[in-house]
Amino acid sequence: MKIVSAIIKPFKLDDVRQALSEVGVSGITVSEVKGFGRQKGHTELYRGAEYVVDFLPKMKLEVAVAADKLDSVLDAITESAKTGKIGDGKIFVTDLEQVIRIRTGETGVDAL
Amino acid sequence: MLLKKLNRAMAGVFALALAAPSVALAEDKLSSGDTAWMLAATVLVLFMTIPGLSLFYAGMVRAKNGLSVMMQCFAITAMMTILWAIAGYSIAFGGEGEYWGGLSKLFLAGVGVDSLSGTIPETVFMVFQMTFAIITPALIVGAFAERMKFSAMLVFMAIWLLVVYAPIAHWVWGDGGWLGGKGILDFAGGTVVHINAGIAGLVAALVMGRRKGYPGTPMMPHNLMFTVVGAGMLWVGWFGFNAGSELAADGVAGMAMAVTQIATAAAALTWMFAEWIAHGKPSVLGIASGAVAGLVAITPASGAVGPMGAIAVGAASGLGCFIAAVKLKKMFGYDDSLDAFGVHGVGGIIGALLTGVFCAPSLGGAGFGDGISSIAGQVSVQALGIGATLVYTGVVTFIILKVLDLVMGLRVTEEQESEGLDLALHDERAYIL
């Protein structure tokens, strides 16, 4: 099992959600985050005082997937989140040791 | 032929003599029209402080300091009310001295239900003036926002009202006041309110020093929605401020309303376009600030200039205050946090000087002050008023602040400043989201 964490542009959230449900992913967790990579920040101006804002709003998605679904999930996210411009984001894949469904107590792949 | 003319002249004089007593009596009679308007005007000016100015300022500070601004304005409102009633009114309007009104109306002695001030109850006049005594100190808050101790602020404001504001109000508006006697034109408080608060603010900003991290650390307005809402409230309330300063519901009040609206609009547009040209985009903080700059400048001029003069006054202030707030402040490096001096001080000076120009009948104005007959003459009296206020307010404010700094300290600690005044001084948060 793996955890797929994706940092994407906020306005792409709906597209990614749709793409994920098309490959059979039924649950995701989303958080609002700030960050930057190669994308430059923007400048704000208040009565002549200029501020460079480095941290840009992004969305972070986390999905737990079974190993056999990993590739289709990665493709789905990559295709739907891409705009071709700097700042599209990154996907991180990490090992997932254990999963438990709280309501029923199911574990492992049955809990995904 | 000559006899007939003499006879007619005599008849005229006789008729005037008969009419004169009834004219004198009419001036002392209560006018319900004037009173109704002044009751409303008073409410409008109070609205300018709570919540107009409060929101305007609060929106411009960081979220962790939002409540502290509201608290300062609200507390000033309450405290100035009591101090004005007890002593401020008397010092400003209690008598006929050259430099102050004396103590004969201490504790509002002699001000009863039926007392009159012109055609309105004296109680209404007193409260109307009280709202001015409230907003002037509240304006200074903009200069020392985000770093002053609440206790020190209360003491400072209490002293400042009685020793700076009330005497200057008397100089300009009180019976026998020396600036009024020289023919100064300050209809609603260009010197008394705006230059006064602006200079005091600049002095406070310099004495207290810059905020921690200024100017490198970003200190962005946390809620410009509040600021624009506040600016709108100021614009609307200002009709009480300017048109109400006529103390009557008449043509002069009507013209004051007209020139106020026109000057404010001209200033808002001027700042907006100036910023658009200088920085490439117009901003909402800019247009709102421009409007306030226009309101400030038209304040002394509202009883003397005509509509076209108002356009000039507004445009000049919109541009002048834009330069002061945006360029001058950066150049000199002082931390007048919310531009109390940049907008109120500079706008007040521009307005006071241009009042001397556009009051001229040849430029559509209502005429010069008593004893003055030229633009040069009027402008020099205006300059005298500006200079006197600058010196008196500057020096006395400096002394009060320095003494208070020794006795109780003016600034919060660095830790409190970082934590934010809302939590540090009031144990409260504005936003629990």
Image: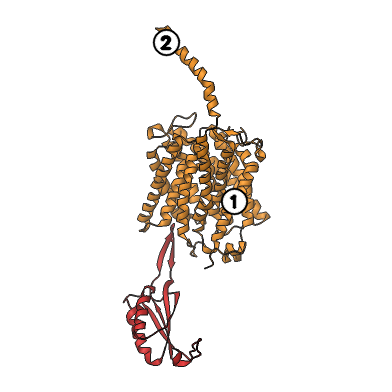
Both marks 1 and 2 on one chain:
yes
For residue B5, the mark is: 2
The residue sitting at 45% across, 75% down in the picture is: A33
Q: Can residue A1 be seen in this snapshot? A: yes
Q: Amino acid at mark 1?
A: Ile
Q: Say if A29 sits above or below B382 in the image.
A: below
For this rendering, which residue is in front, B18 or B66?
A: B18
| Mark 2: secondary structure | helix
Residue A109, placed above or below residue B421: below
Q: Residue A3 location, x and y as percent? A: 44, 87
Chain A: its colour in the image is red
**Which residue sits at x=38%, y=34%?**
B364
Q: Could you tell whether B85 is left or right of B334 in the image?
A: right
Which residue is identified by label 1? Answer: B76
Q: Amino acid at mark 2?
A: Lys
The tint chain B carries is orange
Give the chain letter at badge 1: B
Labels 1 & 2 near each other (Cβ < 8 A): no
Measure the alpha-carbon separation of dots 1 and 2.
Answer: 64 Å
Mark closest to the chain's N terminus, 1 or 2: 2
Q: Tag 1's secondary structure?
A: helix
State the residue in front, B9 or B334.
B9
